[in-house]
């Protein structure tokens, strides 16, 4: 909002000791209609203005808020967030400007979490009860991840649509997860974290109920897509809460700890899923259905505890000031003021804050662009089918409409402009897009490939699939410890991206005669080691580069772009698999009357034909030929995130919540985190001074200096 629009204006306030004071709607940028505000509130909120006869805003300078009001008297408390005199005196003008600007525009969910942290700080029982409750949610999510991927393969095969359903569901899930996360993040910010938990729990339970009872392919796919929204939401909100209450120096370790149940569930999960899918007929429906009971039992305790803590924070006066945007705080500050906002206005404001139009356009465009890759193989004329062409054309047109809306139409766009212009976030997005693109290129059909080419039992096959998950968890914890010790992340991330490139190369080599047990296991280990180091780096760097207000958005947007990479990878994998597998089976000597049956179900190839059977060997050769271009592309494209990682900044990870506000997790300022405005400098460390070179540097030298700059 331009300051020039207010400079020179009369405040327009007729003051009175007892009567209300009129406030212009333009001056406060109120979204809702407010007709009056008590003078006492203005005295405290704009103390400098009333005392000195000047505007509380001098250019971009906001006066520090220092007032506290009596909670017992029933008046709203301005306890927090505040700047006391010592803190205000120690801050430069620019630091005070930034602190006040971020507090002024902080949304309800963010302020509630800061207030809840202050409440938790004085009650150990409440702290540990929340930790245990969040751990229960993490346990549920990890148990889901350790079992449902195997149920999905058997569920798809039971409908005779293994190849089509895996690609279609992966692509659709990636799209829905990507576009739902910004929406869920908005709910977290506008309302609260616990409200978001309740909303996603409904999606989770309804989705799995549909899958468990699915009579058709369409119902199975729809249920998996709906449940994916719940899965993504559980993961996202847990990540946001963990990031809310952890300083940067602990962020990587605590975030990795949310996946720690995989360390044992990776081995317990196959013992649960193995007997179910080995049963004749497979009981995959029971596997999905059990989570309709498990999830509510695990999620509700955390929701209840957070609501109790929020109520206590309100009772203590911690939320009377900090529960909404600054402009809405002024309205809420006096209990006698009646908010005349209509229900229609509330819905309109909700739609604006959620950017529902942008979400709809983005979802529709991605569906129309990526789903044809899975549908083309079944359409008459394949890619020449007019419907497929129309979907692609409309998808790109609507994507252009989405971009135009976000730039010129949306007042609170999904693609937050502050975040999109952030160089650290841009590099993190580049790394994660290509990281996940290469990941799904290789992994979409990798477990099916291993299931056919190896004669492992279902339990051992489940163990193998979960090596990657186990490794990501174990190495992620180790990476978190290293970041806590070193307070840096860049070089560990570059190391991880290099190892992951090697892992994809080993996967390319370990086909055919080279597909021995040792090689296949090393593929999972190397990719897990490299992936854990990379994910830790992008998460911490992107979260450190934004204020607390933008934390949920940056987590959601990074996930959105990551899922874009996943969507592209799974769509390409599905198109290659559908377009070549049956032809390769025919060329390798599979009888024509068996091709569709073997293509549609992995269990037909494995259970009906021993490993030495000529038909099984023909199928294996066809599988090897089909995955070759996918593994080759994954290896080559893995170079891109490695190059982007070289240019990442290397922030110092200290006690602050982020490198923008330099406040702790409770919203209180942390002093001494690097001199000046250099977020990469450690406390007590002089900022680096680079002398002018005596001769011009070569382009290659400049590139490497930028890449390895601390």
Image (spheres, helix red, strand yellow):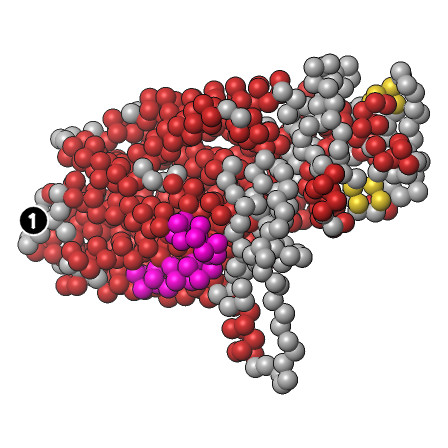
Q: Is residue 357 above or below residue 612?
A: above
What residue would you read off at disc 1? 610
Q: Secondary structure at mark 1?
A: loop
Question: Is 487 included in the stretch rendered in magenta?
Answer: yes
The residue shown at (76%, 19%) is 334
Looking at the picture, how far across and down is residue 207, in whole percent?
A: 38, 28
Q: Is residue 668 above or below residue 482?
A: above
Start-end of magenta stretch: 479-504
Q: Quadrant of the N terminus?
A: top right
Looking at the picture, how far across and down is residue 119, in whole percent?
A: 56, 26
Which image quadrant is residue 262 in?
Answer: top left
Residue 554 relative to residue 608: left or right: right
Tell me if I can see residue 396 in this picture: no
Looking at the picture, how far across and down is residue 235, in whole percent?
A: 43, 37
Q: Is residue 401 above or below residue 122?
A: below
The residue shown at (52%, 59%) is 650
Badge 1 density bin: few <14, some 14–19, many ≥20, Cα 10 Å: few
């Amino acid at each position: 909002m331009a300051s020039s629009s207010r400079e020179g204006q009369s405040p327009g306030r007729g003051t009175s000791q007892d009567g209300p004071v009129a406030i212009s709607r333009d001056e406060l940028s109120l979204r809702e209609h407010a007709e009056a505000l008590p003078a006492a509130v203005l005295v405290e909120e704009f103390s400098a203005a009333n005392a000195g006869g000047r505007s509380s805003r001098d250019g971009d300078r906001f006066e520090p808020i220092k007032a506290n009001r009596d909670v017992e008297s029933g008046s709203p408390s301005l306890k927090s967030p505040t700047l006391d005199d010592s803190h205000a005196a120690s801050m430069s003008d620019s630091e005070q400007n930034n602190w006040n600007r971020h507090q002024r525009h902080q949304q309800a969910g963010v302020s509630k979490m800061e207030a809840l942290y202050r409440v938790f700080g004085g009650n150990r029982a409440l702290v540990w009860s929340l930790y245990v409750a969040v751990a229960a949610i993490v346990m549920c999510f990890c148990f889901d991840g350790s079992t449902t991927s195997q149920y999905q393969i058997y569920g798809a095969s039971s409908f005779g649509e293994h190849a089509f359903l895996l690609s279609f569901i992966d692509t659709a899930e990636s799209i829905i997860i990507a576009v739902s996360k910004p929406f869920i993040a908005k709910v977290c910010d506008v309302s609260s974290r616990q409200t978001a938990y309740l909303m996603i729990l409904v999606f989770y339970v309804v989705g799995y109920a549909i899958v468990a009872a699915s009579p058709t392919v369409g119902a199975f796919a729809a249920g998996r897509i709906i449940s994916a929204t719940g899965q993504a939401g559980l993961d996202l909100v847990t990540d946001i809460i963990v990031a809310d209450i952890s300083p940067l120096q602990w962020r990587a370790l605590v975030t990795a700890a949310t996946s720690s149940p995989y360390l044992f569930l990776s081995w317990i999960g196959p013992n649960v899923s193995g007997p179910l899918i080995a049963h004749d007929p497979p009981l995959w429906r029971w596997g999905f259905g059990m989570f309709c009971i498990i999830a509510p039992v695990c999620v509700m305790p955390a929701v209840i505890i957070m609501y109790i803590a929020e109520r206590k924070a309100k009772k203590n006066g911690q939320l009377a000031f900090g529960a909404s945007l600054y402009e809405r705080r002024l309205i809420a500050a006096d209990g006698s003021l009646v908010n005349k906002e209509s229900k229609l206005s509330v819905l309109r404001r909700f739609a604006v804050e959620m950017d529902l139009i942008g979400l709809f356009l983005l979802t529709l465009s991605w569906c129309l662009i990526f789903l044809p890759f899975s549908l083309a193989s079944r359409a008459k004329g394949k890619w020449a089918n007019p419907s497929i062409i129309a979907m692609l054309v409309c998808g790109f047109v609507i994507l252009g409409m989405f971009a135009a809306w976000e730039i010129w139409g949306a007042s609170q766009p999904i693609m937050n402009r502050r975040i999109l212009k952030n160089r650290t976030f841009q590099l993190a997005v580049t790394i994660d897009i290509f990281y996940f693109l290469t990941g799904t290129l290789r992994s979409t059909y990798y477990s099916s490939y291993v299931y056919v080419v190896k004669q492992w039992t279902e339990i051992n096959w489940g163990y193998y699939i979960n090596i990657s998950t186990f490794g990501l968890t174990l190495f992620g914890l180790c990476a978190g410890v290293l970041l806590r010790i070193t307070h840096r992340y860049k070089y560990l991330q570059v190391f991880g991206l290099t190892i992951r490139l090697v892992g994809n190369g080993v996967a390319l080599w370990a086909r055919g005669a080279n597909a021995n047990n040792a090689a296949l296991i090393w593929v999972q280990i190397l990719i897990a080691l490299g992936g854990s180091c990379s994910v830790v780096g992008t998460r911490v760097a992107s979260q450190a580069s934004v204020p607390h207000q933008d934390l949920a958005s940056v987590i959601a947007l990074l996930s959105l772009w990551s899922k874009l990479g996943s969507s592209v990878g799974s769509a390409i994998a599905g198109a290659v698999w559908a377009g070549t597998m049956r032809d390769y089976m025919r060329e390798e000597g599979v009888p024509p009357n068996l091709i569709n049956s073997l293509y549609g179900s992995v269990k037909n190839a494995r259970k009906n034909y021993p490993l030495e059977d000529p038909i099984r060997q023909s199928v294996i050769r066809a599988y090897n030929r089909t995955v070759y271009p996918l593994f080759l592309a994954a290896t080559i494209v893995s170079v891109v995130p490695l190059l982007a990682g070289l240019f990442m900044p290397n922030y110092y990870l200290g006690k602050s919540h982020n490198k923008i506000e330099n406040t702790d997790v409770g919203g209180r300022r942390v002093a001494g985190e690097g001199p000046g405005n250099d977020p990469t400098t450690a406390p007590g460390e002089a900022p680096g001074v680079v002398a002018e070179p005596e001769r011009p540097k070569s382009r290659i030298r400049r590139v490497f200096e930028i890449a390895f700059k601390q």
